[in-house]
Amino acid sequence: MSGTSIVLGIFLMYWFLISVLDRKGILEKYDISTFGPLPILMIRTTKGLKLLDVLARPKRYWRVFANIGILMMFVGMIAMFLVIAISDLALYTSFLNDNVPEPGKYNSARNIFLIPGVNEFIPFTWGVIALIVTLVVHEFSHAILCRVENIRVKSMGILLALVPIGGFAEPDDEQLFGKKEEVKRELPLTATIEEIEAWEQQQKEEKQLKEIINESPDLSPKETKPEPVVTATRTQRARILAAGVMANFSVAFIAFLLFFGPVLGAIAPLSDAMIVSINESSPAQLAGLQENMIITQVDDTPVSTGMDFLSYLETVEPGDTLQVHASKDRVVSVYDLKVPSSSEKCYSGVPIGGVKEGSPAEAAGIEPGMTMLRINNTRMRSIASFVDFMEGTEANQTIEVEMLPSANYTGELTENGTAVFEVRLISNPEESESGFLGVIYGSNGVLDCQMLGISIWMPQSGYYLEALKKIPSILNHAVGWIILFGLPIYGFAGEGFRGFSGTIAQFYQPVGWAEPLGVGIFWIANSLLWIGWLNFYVGLFNCLPAVPLDGGHVFRDYTYSLIYRFTRNEDVSERVSNSIAASFSMLILFSFLFMIFGPFIGQWM
């Protein structure tokens, strides 16, 4: 039975059980309600309400916290509205230019929702942890501010959908938003004679009851008049609503501070030499090496990159025995590998995987797919040979490069079937004193070693880790924020960074204070990354000026206050502010729908 079938079976059993318990009234007996098609259970309790009063005691602190939250909410409101407007404008422009983007994962409807297991960018385990923290922080900050402003909290509880997915606090809506006006029930135009007679009888009974109450000396107006409900002022309501957003932003800040600080500082590259394929019956396979192992050492020589490994192999002779240290799941083992007696070196040349734009190699006519055989009179046996040679060059030096042409090459060839290029080097952009040619060796960072029958991948984990650590230093530019908050989706080059898990975790190891934790440091890093990312996005989403989001209620209240200053009429201000808020809500809703369905409409047109 497949995993999908098991999950579907568990879901159906859960749905059936909850439906039966709900129909029999058992859930209501224990103050549990359901909502949604899943359904999601709201398990309420009044336990812990006294704790809210304890946490709410520093009222001055919480009010300052919430006042800052109001300012942050308006900043987020403007930012989110601009993002939506720019996205819609870009999509509309693509329609005019007949260049509508194709439907894909970046504009898929499932990826609009930040739900682990639904959104394909959010890993399930870390996403669930982050979502629980995000919802609990958001809802309980609302509850604490309710008590600060003397608004009753009716209950607290957890949201359950097979597994706990968050918490909630249930304030008194009548105190928070004011008493809703009762709508007088009228008869429909299609009422039957029986319904009309029943309605007239009910009206008659209600009228008689009112006359009895008014004429009775035992019932004073004081006893019949209900006590007024104390409702929150607009400022108090804004504080309560903004507290959730401010709490999410605060947690995101703390999580990112820890992630980019002590946690990344305790992670170091292990080695950039992963075995990605092994030929059958090759020396590597006979020695016991496996795919996805990381080579860390050969004999007594440490290996940091695949080039270190290949450079060492140039010193060995046929028939030698090598001790290869390789790690799998961060457990290092030693393998005895015998070099075949009749074998060539790992390379007969250096494969060219790409040519950098504007480089001397591009100007000379060197193309991807070629193989570098010689520079001047020096044989290029491996990438290590090429690197060693280039370190001895300088800017403005002219070199002669001999290449084995690619299948599509149409230029002149020598009698040996090779292509020769004269190249004038430029200064190295990495501020090195050596010259710069501008070729990208290997194929997607994969190096083949036919002598041992293996292919090695060099992902440059050290550079990637350093790039992660530098993100906070570039937050003074807009591109820094784009990289930070697009990191799980786009990464640095469209690959996306989901954290230190799976294959990527194999290239790193804990160091310093994290050494005793072992793989636990990766759990901490992944949790902090997704807690920070999800808290920020949930907080930002709730800033949108669309009811029923927190930002929508605050936007409506402040719109009312602004209009009232000019009209001095409560009814007019209420109607106009409600209309403006509803218009913004519909505009944002249709904007999301346009972003989701626009690419499909474009393909259909």
Image (cartoon, rainbow, N blue to C red):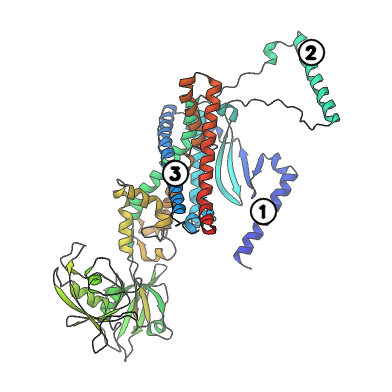
Which one is in front in this view, the residue at disc 2 or the one at disc 3? 3
Q: CA distance from mark 3 to mark 1?
A: 41 Å
The residue nearer to you, when weighing 44 against 173, is: 173
Crowdedness near tag 1: few (<14), some (14–19) or many (≥20) residues, C-alpha within 10 Å: some
In the rendered structure, which disc, 2 or 3, sits on the residue that comes first in sequence?
A: 3
In the rendered structure, which disc, 3 or 1, sits on the residue that comes first in sequence?
A: 1
Classify the position of the N terminus by image quarter: bottom right
Q: Position of residue 41 (x, y in %)?
A: 63, 45
Residue type (three-letter) at the residue carrying disc 2: Ile
Residue drawn at 27 percent across, 80 percent down? 411
Residue drawn at 35 percent across, 83 percent down? 452
Q: CA distance from mark 2 to mark 3?
A: 61 Å
Residue type (three-letter) at the residue carrying disc 3: Ala
Circles 1 and 2: CB atoms closer than 8 Å: no
Circles 2 and 3: CB atoms closer than 8 Å: no
Which one is in front in this view, the residue at disc 1 or the one at disc 2? 2
Residue behind mark 1: 14
Check residue 85 in the rendering and tell me which mark sits there, or answer none.
3
- Residue 422 appears in view: yes
Q: Quadrant of residue 388?
A: bottom left
Image vertical order of residue 116 relative to residue 140, above or below: below
Residue, far top: 217
Image vertical order of residue 484 relative to residue 322, above or below: above
Check residue 212 in the rendering and tell me which mark sits there, or answer none.
2
Q: CA distance from mark 1 to mark 2?
A: 53 Å
